[in-house]
Image: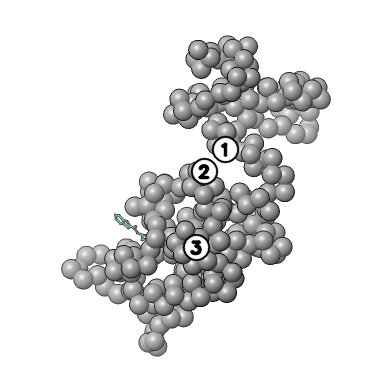
């Protein structure tokens, strides 16, 4: 999968290009992350990419022309990487507090794209004419305003990259992800057997895989019911899960 990121701070993206699963995906050629700096598409000596807003007010606004040239170049690069440039296969996405909130369903959909061109704003924002002419979708990672779109772009790329079948070595673990089944994650334990006078739940040492799966599901259900009643309300248990919930006396979904 191909990502072109348009940002005046390309160095920030070392955080996902140089560490962890995302770095390995890049080094193995399963993912390409190209950073494109709009300053490289300016024609003045100061490499200017921002100006004072028309109508006055605080701060600066990012100018349309350098961003337009950067996006056009990003599309050429995506094409050179084998991407189909139509919006259905390689959309231009603006990271913005005004966007649609990123969730697991949209991450799964994005993992099917050939690529994505991610536009990271700074200052007070981007000239509206650039957005209306070039942006296919706006995506938010939450209802708060940051100093720029770079961290949201990295959150988006991280969540999509780890969903790619060729990246998640044990495809099953992706399926077992919390949220994938609509529930929060279960507790996890590892060595030592006792920590701070707390031992590991015995069922996890039993080697009885069916009982372990049942225990993990019940713990997910208990945690989801308490912490995310909205997810619990929407959760539809299977017949086997209904039985497990009844046995655990979590019976508001067993009728
Ligand atoms: C600045 C601002 C100031 C007062 C009231 C509202 C405001 N919105 C913005 C704003 O959107 N500034 C941006 C900085 C311009 C675009 C990039 N920036 C950004 C993106 N801040 N926060 C995000 C973001 C993106 C995705 N998900 C959450 C936040």
Are the residues tagged 1 and 3 within 8 Å (C-beta)?
Answer: no
Q: Residue at x 25, y 64 (%)?
A: 58
Are the residues tagged 1 and 2 within 8 Å (C-beta)?
Answer: yes
Mark 2 and mark 3: span between their CA atoms?
19 Å
State the image coordinates of residue 27 (x, y, percent, origin top left). 70, 64
Determine crowd level at label 2: few under 14, some 14-19, many 20+ residues with C-alpha closer than 10 A: some
| Res. 41 image quadrant | bottom left
| 188 is higher (above) or lower (below) than 222 | below
What residue is pinned by disc 2?
104
What residue is pinned by disc 1?
180
Q: Please state which of residues 227 and 102 is positioned toward the viewer in this rendering.
A: 102
Determine crowd level at label 1: few under 14, some 14-19, many 20+ residues with C-alpha closer than 10 A: some
Which circle's residue, 1 or 2, is located before the other in the chain? 2
As drawn, the label of residue 90 is 3
Q: Residue at x 21, y 71 (%)?
A: 54
Q: Please state which of residues 130 and 56 is positioned toward the viewer in this rendering.
A: 130
Residue 219 in view, yes or no: no
Which circle's residue, 1 or 3, is located before the other in the chain? 3
């Amino acid at each position: 999968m191909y990502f072109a990121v348009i940002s005046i701070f390309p160095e920030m993206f070392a955080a996902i290009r140089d560490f962890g699963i995302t770095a390995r995906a890049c080094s193995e050629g399963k993912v390409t992350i190209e950073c494109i700096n709009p300053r490289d598409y300016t024609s003045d000596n100061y490499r200017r990419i921002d100006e004072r807003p028309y109508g006055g007010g605080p701060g600066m606004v990012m100018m349309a022309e350098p961003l337009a040239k950067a996006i056009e170049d990003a599309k050429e690069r995506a094409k050179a990487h084998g991407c189909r440039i139509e919006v259905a296969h390689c959309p231009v996405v603006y990271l913005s507090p005004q966007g649609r909130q990123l969730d697991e369903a949209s991450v799964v959909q994005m993992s099917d794209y050939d690529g994505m061109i991610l536009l990271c704003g700074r200052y007070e924002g981007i000239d509206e004419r650039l957005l209306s002419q070039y942006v296919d979708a706006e995506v938010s990672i939450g209802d708060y305003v940051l100093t720029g779109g770079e961290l949201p772009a990295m959150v988006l790329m991280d969540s999509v990259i780890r969903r790619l079948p060729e990246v998640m070595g044990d495809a099953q673990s992706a399926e077992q992800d919390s949220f994938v089944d609509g529930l929060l994650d279960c507790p996890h334990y590892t060595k030592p057997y006792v920590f701070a006078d707390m031992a590991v739940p015995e069922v996890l040492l039993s080697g009885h895989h069916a009982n372990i799966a049942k225990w993990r599901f019940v713990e997910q259900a208990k945690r989801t019911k308490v912490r995310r009643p909205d997810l619990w309300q929407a959760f539809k248990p299977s017949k086997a899960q209904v039985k497990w919930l009844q046995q655990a006396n979590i019976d508001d979904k067993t009728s």
